[in-house]
Image: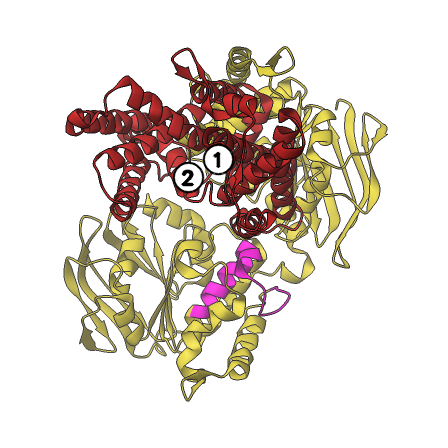
Chain colours: A yellow, B red
Amino acid sequence: MSDLILEMDGIAKSYGGIEVLHGVHFDLYSGEVHAVIGQNGAGKSTLMKILNGVTVRDGGTIRLDGREVLYGSPIEARKHGIGMIFQEFSLVPSLTVSQNVFLAKEPRIRALILNDKKCEERTASLLHEIGADDINPRQLICDLSTGSQQMVEIAKALSSESRIVIMDEPTASLSHKEIEKLFKVIGKLTEKGISIIYVSHYLQDIFKICNRITVLRDGNRISTKDVSETTMEETINDMLGERLIAKRTRTRPSDEKAADTLLEIKDLSVGKHVRNVSFTLRRGEILGIAGLLGSGRSEIVGAIYGVLKKSSGEILIRGNKTNIRSPRDAIKHGIAMVPEDRRKQGLVMSFSIKENMIFPILSKILKYRLIRDREGLKIINGFMEKMSIKAAGPWQIVKSLSGGNQQKVVVAKSMMSDSSILFLDDPTFGIDIQSKQEIMNSVSEFADAGNGVVFISSELDEIVSYCDRIIILKKGEITDMLDCNKRSDISEELLTKMIQ
Amino acid sequence: MSTRNSLMGKAKFNDYVVYIVCALIFVFFSITLHNKGFFTGRNLMNIIRQTTMISVMAVGMTFVLSCGEIDLSIGSVVAISAMITAVLLRYTGVFFAVLGGLATGAVIGLINGFFVTVVRIPSFIVTLGMGAIAGGFARLITNLESVPVANDAFNFIFGSGDVGPVSILFIWTFVLLLLGQLVLRKTRFGRYVLATGGNKTSANYSGININRIKMAVLILNGVLASFAGILYTGRLHGARYSLGDSDLLLVIAAVIIGGTSLFGGKGTVVGSIIGSLIMGMINNGLVLMGLNVSLQMIFRGVIIIASVSLSLRGAKEG
């Protein structure tokens, strides 16, 4: 391969006395796409922040082209040819494309006056270089799609002649088309000898476009391998470590033991989205709904929970007909729900873990209408341990938790109320693998205790691993119902085919 | 696609609404106050004369709001700077008196900036407190006495003079309009102000020293407010602690109506000046209508809320 342009050696960093990077090594060849992966908290964002100059390292050296460099701010990093493309919040929405691309390095007429024309011309040629001619340099950022904004970010990195471009979860909010376009741009950049550091959770993408993969775990570098010499399984093992290799699959209760029906849905229709859906949920069962986005999967649980209005159909809980019109009614009937968008619907972000978790148990810990904090804390601590929520303590503000831990708080909340029916709408979306497993394990335990769970997920392997029965939903109708105790051929591939 | 178009349509509407409101109010008063002399050269120049101080402060406030901050101390800065300038005129010449007045504003801006950028208190609170402090000092300096100014050169340059048929205040407004628009639109500083207000994190990561920008904006605003105080002094041939008392609301309303975002990132000096003229016309029109002070207050409040609501329509996407 070509020349080594970047070497980071023995990089160490501590926050508040806790070391999060223990002497990490990382290197980069010119024209290479090098993936950095690891679970949340593995240290990859800290490492990237150090490289980008946002964070100052405690120890270690950074060498560019074999020469040691020292810098302590993003501006200085940029002067060394290191640019970063952030996950979000990195463009000024009220300024135009060209104003953003040349922000803080505007071409000028004389010393004082900005040269907008030159700025726009140069932006247009940069955009042309990466094949994004459809973007007008004069457009406001807030009028652009997410994908186009990312192209602007890339142009911005190129405008300062970056040789190393760090991309942090670049595909997270892009459509399939936009992702394809991004990969083409990455190809063009590497042809020019620009190196890409690609930070992502999406392993399939990584195996498609990267040359090498560095895996970080708990602040250590575990491995750096050529993509051609490793496999996805090996990479996942490196990420998770020894203790988590064995994937726990649920021990499914046999059909004979399947006791009384908890929830029965008869001929449920919700507008255009759901047509005549009927199913039952039994005690101790996890019922999966496999369907594509837009298949009506969220609308089914939404209608049962009283968020959406149902057009027709009956809901029977423990054999009794009910009339649920609002989430309040649903909660009274013992239904809890983990909604799709945890930030908007599930949590008060500025509250602490305790303040969030105390809502569902308020009635239990009231005495003379006053909250008995100590009682509450006991229950909350129990759940935090059970769900392995990683936080400094129950007083930590939810906003400052990682996505995985935030989601654990949401799930814990739904289990803490005395509900016996739990709806989970894509509860593991966008969170790290370990948190996923921890959440699903506690959901399993919840079901084993004699409760029922309806589980929706975009990740079909999770449905395969954890569900007892699976509803196949296509365009608002149930096309099949699989019983995992009776069929042994159920796999991710099978489900993927069935829902198309 | 259609939603994006309609959003842009709304944004455009929002950019021009200030001119529409201005024209509407102008036409309304021209017709209803036809026989009370609203639409006469003398009265129109009078409106500009009365509006200049608001315009000057509105230029500064445009920068402050564009930067994502706010400055509620300007009313008191007007008063204390006017008092200090007037008192200094007893002892020194025009140059040092004016310099002293402007320095007062700069120092207050600097203190505001210190608390906003170093101690990290929201500007809303800092400047609210600073307004009280400065207001107190303005009263303390002469024990509530007003200070007359008999310096003719000062009075001519800073408010009372006319150059031909044109009031010197009109010239000051025009100069500040040009300078303000140039700085905001065409210089690095202006661009950095908009970037800081539009997205602090991004501005910071791009290499902009956002604290320095905030500091500079608050100092600039202090200086412009004290300049408004000096103009008041020149126009009224003296200073009182009550100068600038009711200007804060007018200034903020003028800037918002003009199209500057209350949440930062978007600003226009031209719009702010037009917004100030709207405020001036409203004041003038209400007086000509013969309303008493109490009714003027009520109507002014109603009209301000109505026009700001109109100008914020469609601008809420942030």
Label 1 resides on the chain identified as B
Q: In front here: B205 or B217?
A: B217
Outermost residue to the bottom: A368
Front residue of B283 and A202:
B283
Verify whether residue A395 appears in magenta: yes
Query: On the image, which quarter does residue B281 sit in?
Result: top left
Identify the residue at horizontal 29%, vertical 79% (top origin).
A260
Coordinates of residue A488 in the picture (x, y in percent):
42, 59
A13 with respect to A463 (left or right): right
Label 1's element? Answer: helix
Can residue B1 be seen by looking at this rendering? Answer: no
Q: Residues within 10 Å of mark 2 (few under 14, many from 20)?
A: many
* For residue A362, side relative to residue B238 (left or right): left
Residue B61 image label:
1
Where's residue A264, x and y in %? 24, 70
Q: Residue at x 19, y 60 (%)?
A: A268
Quarter-of-image position of residue B44: top left
Q: Nearer the viewer, residue A191 or B141?
A: B141
Q: Is residue A368 visible?
A: yes
**Residue A159: where, in percent of width, then height?**
61, 20
Say which amino acid is labelled 2. Answer: Ile
Check contact, mark 2 vs mark 1: CB within 8 A. Answer: yes
* Mark with earlier residue (2, 1): 1
Q: Image height check: is B144 above or below A181?
A: below
Q: Is residue B9 above or below residue B219?
A: above
Name the residue type under label 1.
Met
Label 2 is found on which chain of the structure? B
Range drawn in magenta: A390-413
Say if the magenta span includes residue A89: no
Q: What residue would you read off at disc 2?
A: B252
Residue found at the very far front of the displayed protein: B150
